[in-house]
Image: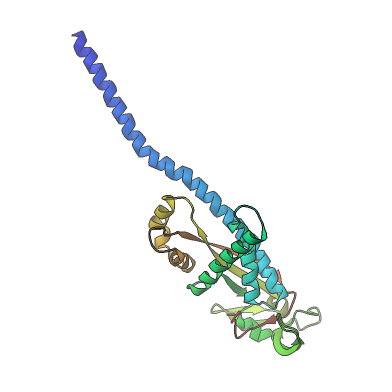
Amino acid sequence: MGANRQASRISLVSRQDGATLAELLYVLPLLFILFFGIIEYTYVYRAKSTLNVATFEAVRAGALNNASLSSMRNALASGMVPLYMQGKSDPVQLAKAYAHASLIAVSIDKLPADVVRIVSPTKNVFDAHKKPLHVKLSGEKKEKYVYVIPNDNLYWRDSKAKKVKINGNNAVVNIQDANLLKISTTWCHKLVTPGLDRLTHSLILKFSSSVEQQACNVLGLPGKNKSYYVAIKSHSVIRMQSPVYYSSKEKNLK
């Protein structure tokens, strides 16, 4: 009788150990996702913070250079360099980091997305407030007689608001509002956590309807070592410090 009880106790303990092991196997993957998800989020947050600062540097470059897209792209790439620094900050490493950031910026522009997009002023706002002036444009050695949105002596200029269409809607914009440069930026941040990057792409990023995320999905490298990217965005606004010029080559205003 005692032997039977002892055997029953051993059997019960064995079943409990087996149940605990099964529960552990269920919980471990969740703990893995949670732990490495926190690590991944930290990297994404760092990238977003860097992009916020770089976006301000880009909009400031645009304010000083007639809303030139090329100036803003270069400033944005320079601002994203800290993300790609490895080891010591020597000139060679800086050059490599800038080349890496510039490559990502160029790649995004070639895909169906804009690394830098001017939200305001639009081409319609430009047409409503443009004036012919002699100005020295960014990258030019001499002054040219061109149409621009003037940014000097705004206090004495005609402050009458003008009706324009923005995104299909009627809006009222005066000369002061027309001199506010607002941009949006897009960056593709590479996910760094092995396994979790593929899982995030397969369950979430792959099915995103965002144009920016679709562009970042295309940016991934093919093959076994395929990389996965998440799209991050930022905005910034500043008052123009130079006349707004519409470049037919850049098509900076849309």
Is residue 117 shown above or below 192? below
Does residue 52 appear in the picture of this structure? no
Measured from the top left, where is residue 111 in percent x and y? 48, 72
Does residue 225 appear in the picture of this structure? yes
Is residue 66 shown above or below 10? below
Quarter of the figure that contains the C terminus = bottom right
| Foreground residue among 54 and 174 | 54
Measured from the top left, where is residue 86 in percent x and y? 59, 54
| Foreground residue among 76 and 181 | 76
Residue at the (38%, 55%) spot, across then down: 203
| Foreground residue among 207 and 176 | 207
Q: Quadrant of residue 176?
A: bottom right
Quarter of the figure that contains the N terminus = top left
Is residue 131 shown above or below 23? below
Residue 65 shown left or right of residue 83 in the figure: right
Q: Quadrant of residue 228?
A: bottom left
Q: Residue furthest front?
A: 92
Measured from the top left, where is residue 3 in percent x and y? 20, 10
Measured from the top left, where is residue 229 in percent x and y? 47, 60
Residue at the (70%, 85%) spot, across then down: 148
Colouring scheme applied when the structure was drawn: rainbow
Residue 24 shown left or right of residue 160 in the figure: left
Q: Quadrant of residue 90?
A: bottom right
Q: How many numbered circles are shown?
A: 0
